[in-house]
Amino acid sequence: MDVLNRNYLIQHDQIPTSYWNAPERVLQFGTGVLLRGLCDCVIDEGNKKGIFEGRIVVVKSTSQGSLEAFEQQDNVYTLCMRGRQNGSVSESFQRVGAISRVIDATLDWSAVLQLAQSPDLEIVLSNTTEMGLRLEEKDSILENPPHSFPAKLLAVLHTRYQAFQGDPTKGLVVLPTELIDHNGHVLRQLLVTLANRLGLDLEFIKWLNEANYFCDTLVDRIVSGTPAPAISAKWQDQLGYKDSLLIVSEPYLLWAIEGNEQLAHKIQFAKAHPGVIIQEDISLFRTLKLRLLNAFHTINCGLAWLCGFTTVYEAASEAWFGYFMEKMLHRELIPALPDAIDREQAKDFADKVLERFKNPFLNHHWLDISFQYTTKMQTRCVPLLQSYIDKQGKLPTSFVFGMAGFIYFMRIKGQDEKGWFGHFSGKRYYLRDDFAPRWYEIWNLNDLSEVVRAFLAEQSFWLGTSFDFPGLEERLVGFLSQIQDKEENLLRVLAQNEADANTH
């Protein structure tokens, strides 16, 4: 059987030579499935429609993973979009060839700096998770490569500034997709702070601020990554080729970019897909997605996995857990939204979220969602809890149960060659969380009350402040006791709690 690569696309998709010869106009930090399943496929559509004509150079910044599949397939991969949208089921495939090459930053950082000097380069994409948008104490742009993502980007921009002698027309459009409020503004400030810390030329800092566009963005598409082996084998027979890079997403796509007409002219690929929106204020999209999708994922993640659900679909489709999620979304999360947001619009968005969660074709794994779980709870969920209490004057029951699930999920038992791990109901699972060592210390305390008090008082979890609300400690201890006592019957406990709540 053939392997998907450039020759396959030329033969079967009738891709013209001009597609492959397009200049490298995009520098992307991150090889992850979200960028490949959202941003890269949009750029690919723009290339195929002849409205952008630019290829992507991807930078692999971490030590995890191999580039072997990218090299074997000429960086070409398949995106399968399948699921429910507007009440109907659809399935389609897109072969994406927009990536020209993938550079391992740890092995060939000089290649990234060489690209920074290219007159063709116009756009920077990134998705380094919320943890990526921060500085390191010993950051330097002279390292090979610089450690943090902001330091890497500053090195790229400084190299470009020097290569073009401060030409204001050679600035770049920077489109970070990390899920934090005002991600473009945050990234710009990090770069300015680091530039000042390193004593870089004031004229460069002026060029950094004035010649480059740092855009706030919001991306929304569930991309679940590689499908199960049985499904992969089925699609392999259906498509007629092998693809080790194949990824799966839902049909829904939103890429909101804050900017004006001048910016829109610079990123022509936006015209290729109706889900790409450029407007001067994207705050509504940001709030709805961050609070009703991402925070909703996060607060349910640990509890859903402890109840025995592997994927989002399994949890949302089970009667009691599905009801638990729906009740939390409509009765606790929507009431916690800012007053300026239209409630009918919020309910419509929430209903679409539930429909997307019940997509039977999407294997969105809770363990994948748990990546950097502590930071996600901190940035996505705590503001909602605070807002609900401020507005309602009481604790949100389902939300607090979800928080207890998070705490218990972070019950780290030890560390082996694969990393930190937990153990629940006979299963070992691994936690990819920068705060794992601290969780290990917390769970070595004597009892649940001490664990909860340490959790609420841990300032490194909560951006330098302690975290507590009247009655929260007692509720968390109570829920944690239920989880601890009923490991193998946790879903039954949840169902009973929901049934009891409905009788009062």
Image (spheres, rainbow, N blue to C red):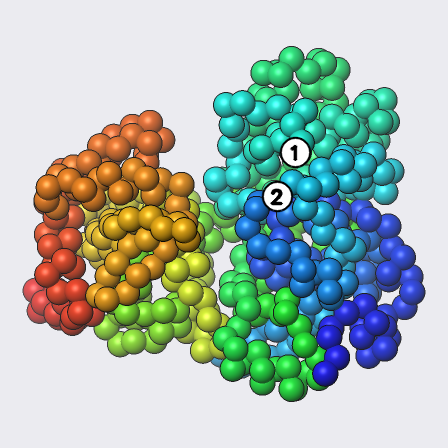
Residue at 85 percent of width and 77 percent of height = 11
Residue 478 screen position, x and y as percent: 10, 52
Q: Is residue 175 visible?
A: no
Label number found at residue 403: none
Label 2: element kind: loop
Q: Is residue 458 visible?
A: yes
Q: Which residue is mark 1?
A: 145
Residue at 82 percent of width and 48 percent of height = 24
Label 1: element kind: loop
Residue 440 located left or right of residue 184? left
Residue 293, quarter of the rendered image = bottom left
Residue 369 screen position, x and y as percent: 42, 57
Q: Earlier in the sequence, mark 1 or mark 2?
A: 2
Residue 354, quarter of the rendered image = bottom left
Residue 359 located left or right of residue 427? right
Residue flagged by tag 2: what amino acid is it? Ser
> How far apart in space, not on screen, are marks 1 and 2 (Cα)?
9 Å
Q: Which residue is mark 2?
A: 61
Evaluate if marks 1 and 2 touch, with contact meaning CB atoms under 8 Å apart: yes
- Location of residue 415 with respect to 78 vertically, above or below: above
Residue at 80 percent of width and 73 percent of height = 9
- Location of residue 13 with respect to 390 vertically, above or below: below
Given residues 341 and 18, the one toward you in this image is: 18
